Image (cartoon, rainbow, N blue to C red):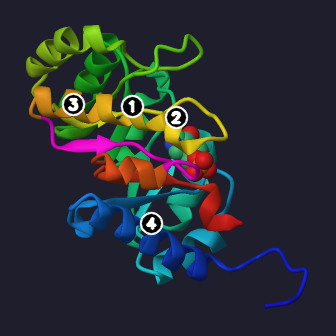
Amino acid sequence: MIIGGDNMGIADNVKDIKRRIHGAAKRAGRNPDAVKLIAVTKTVGVPEIRELLACGVNNIGENRLQVAMPKIEELADMGINWHFIGSLQSNKVKKIIEHFECIHSVDSVRCAEEIQKRAEAVGKQVKVLLEVNVSGESSKHGLSPNKLFEVLESCNDLDNVIVQGLMTMAPLTDDFETARPYFQKLKQLCKKYGLTECSMGMTDDFEVAVEEGATMVRIGRALFI
Ligand SMILES: *Cc1c(COP(=O)(O)O)cnc(C)c1O
């Protein structure tokens, strides 16, 4: 490494993140293989994604369709599972279900219904997670926990929408421990409703999320520093 250089390299970062996921899972008595690393590539381009693929990371998260599309097109047939993690606009749903393996950010019945309509038209089953605002911050997207039951009920009637789990974003702070109760709450909700996938944990708090039962962590910055 060049002294003063700021790039540790994606391969080293992946190794380090996997080691930390492994450690956190072990501390909690969990199987490290039950945690999927989703690399969030919204700030980087195709070369970085190729490096991730070379490290065996093929779950890739993007939050804006327009930004993702050129990368998706250039990397077609590379075996990437694309995860949509951004806010959903109904006029984008058609394209999103065509290209993404899982949508993490469904936060209304209206949105689930739009997915149903588009999925049915092309004969597809779409895996989704419902985004929950566990912290109650008004600035956050996501369903309030007390709306969750009602939305799950409605989704039951949507044959092409497969609700696999829940997603949340913890409040941003400089103390990662403050995220813990929110992650506990999301995991509780997953258990209560018999949902398998629990998408929580980002660069600053993913070890806490893994300790509390995350099955997917969405990591951006830590991969590219
Ligand atoms: C950007 C983003 C992430 C990754 O955040 P980092 O702090 O860069 O790890 C995770 N989830 C969502 C929804 C995002 O938009």
- Mark with earlier residue (3, 4): 4
- Is label 2 in contact with label 1 (beta carbons under 8 Å)? yes
Magenta part of the chain:
195-205
**Residue labelled with disc 4:** 76
Residue drawn at (62%, 61%) of the image? 222
Question: At label 4, which amino acid type do we have?
Answer: Ala
Instruction: Give the mark toward the camera: 3 or 1.
Output: 1
Q: Amino acid at mark 3?
A: Gln
Instruction: Measure the alpha-carbon separation of dots 2 and 1.
Output: 7 Å
Mark linked to residue 29: none
Say which quadrant the C terminus sits in: bottom right
Query: Type of residue at label 1?
Result: Pro
Q: Nearer the viewer, mark 1 or mark 4?
A: 1
Against 67, residue 37 (above or below) is below
Residue position marked by numbered label 3 in the rendering: 188
Dot 4, how many residues are within 10 Å of its Cα: few (below 14), some (14-19), or many (20+)? few
* Label 3 close to label 1 by CB (< 8 Å): no
Q: In this image, 183 relative to 172: left or right?
A: left
